[in-house]
Image (cartoon, rainbow, N blue to C red):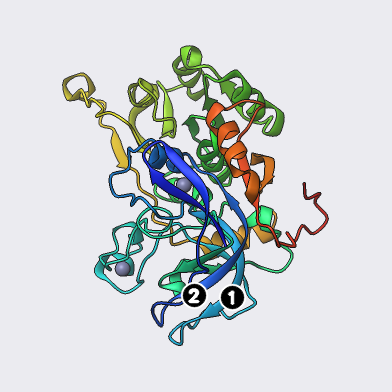
Amino acid sequence: MLAYTYIKPGLFCLTEKPKPALLHPTDAVVRVTLASICASDLHIRAGSVPRAVPGITVGHEMVGVVESVGNAVRTVRPGDRVCVNVETFCGECYFCRRGYVNNCTHSEGGWSLGCRIDGGQAEYVRVPLADTGLCRIPDGVSDRAALFAGDILATGFWAARITPVTPEDTVLVIGAGPTGICTLLCVSRMNPRHLIVCEQDPGRLAFVREHYPQVQAVLPETCRELAVQVSGHGGADAVFEVAGGKDTFTLAWQCARPNATVTVVALYEEPQVLPLPQMYGKNLTFRTGGVDGCDCAEILRLIADSQLDTTPLITHTFPLDQIDRAYELFTSRRDGVMKIAVRMPDSSCREYGEGCL
Ligand SMILES: [Zn+2]
Ligand SMILES: [Zn+2]
């Protein structure tokens, strides 16, 4: 089968590999139908993810059809359409029982797929601990609609879940990349009075204005002023930092009102400064990132119920044999690209009426 492979820092190649087999009774093998490319894949290619193992197939955002299951798998069967969770977790350890699945202590726990073991930018993928790693896609939900439920949408959902937001509140989301948009969609469900999105890229600002006209989309220069003005009490009640830029952590806490919550979803390339003397008396609460991806079933239910829709994020679709081009486009951020769907060779790509490119 074809698999997009991490050869060495700076190089991914489409290579021929054997189709994966079940290794443990808790495994499933999934025939991938649609995969996507994430910024984390670019971090691996850049060599900045030390845990990533050269030789592995990359990709941790995918949906497909269960091909085979080990005899200990209970929740899915061959033929089921499934969404794959970015995180591998046992569901039984101290952390899993409390919902902190990102900190699962199982030997394969955490972000394994497409990082430490073969992932899903390939025709087939072996998913360990399949009972928790796979979620059945409800009938009527297309592959494209379900594609992000296991990773970036899970991240947005988790960020909204750990942040107190009321209908009185002004909420600021910094960063209108794909994860920022997913965070925006999830926090919108909490009906805050004002929603502000801060973004410096003109194309992404335009994307927000086109798809989410109820949101006030601003540049970083005017963000703080707007948060102070619309909230009426010194800044946003809740701030989500999803940009991970050079100055965006500082912007996040500066735009927050006293006693606000600042939720840091972003992954930074450099250490950030927490200037406690300047913050003294502002009494902020910080929540920091690393998705606990344990809500996939709930997210898929909300998609089926038309309460969450991330399909506008898929701006481009490529077949697997053109994945180099897809990466080149995703890296360049040209042509208004947000997310790219990668279609597998013999995928029927169930679309339920949407046009499949
Ligand atoms: Zn990702
Ligand atoms: Zn666990």
Q: Position of residue 233 (x, y in %)?
A: 42, 23
| Secondary structure state at the residue bearing disc 2 | strand
Q: Quadrant of ligand 2?
A: bottom left
Residue extending farthest left: 277
Residue 251 in view: no
Q: Disc 2 marks which amino acid?
A: Ala
Left or right of residue 354, residue 71 in this image? left
Kindly give the residue lying farthest to the front in the view shown. Answer: 16
Residue bearing the label numbered 2: 28
Q: Residue furthest bottom?
A: 71
Q: Earlier in the sequence, mark 2 or mark 1?
A: 2
Disc 1: which residue = 67
- Asked if the residue at tag 1 contacts the one at tag 2, i.e. Cβ–Cβ closer than 8 Å, the answer is yes
Question: For the point 59% across and 23% down, which residue is it?
Answer: 217
Instruction: Specify the label residue 95 is tagged with.
Output: none
At numbered mark 1, what does the secondary structure look like: helix, strand or loop? strand
Instruction: Name the image quarter holding residue 348.
Output: bottom right
Q: Nearer the viewer, residue 292 or 10?
A: 10
On the image, the x and y values in percent for residue 278 come to 21, 19
User: Residue at the spot x=65%, y=77% of the render?
Assistant: 79
Above or below, comparing residue 196 to residue 11 in the picture? above
Q: CA distance from mark 2 to mark 1?
A: 7 Å
User: 28 left or right of 305?
Assistant: left
Q: Residues within 10 Å of mark 2 (few under 14, many from 20)?
A: many
Q: How many marks?
A: 2
For residue 213, side relative to residue 66 (left or right): right
Type of residue at label 1?
A: Glu
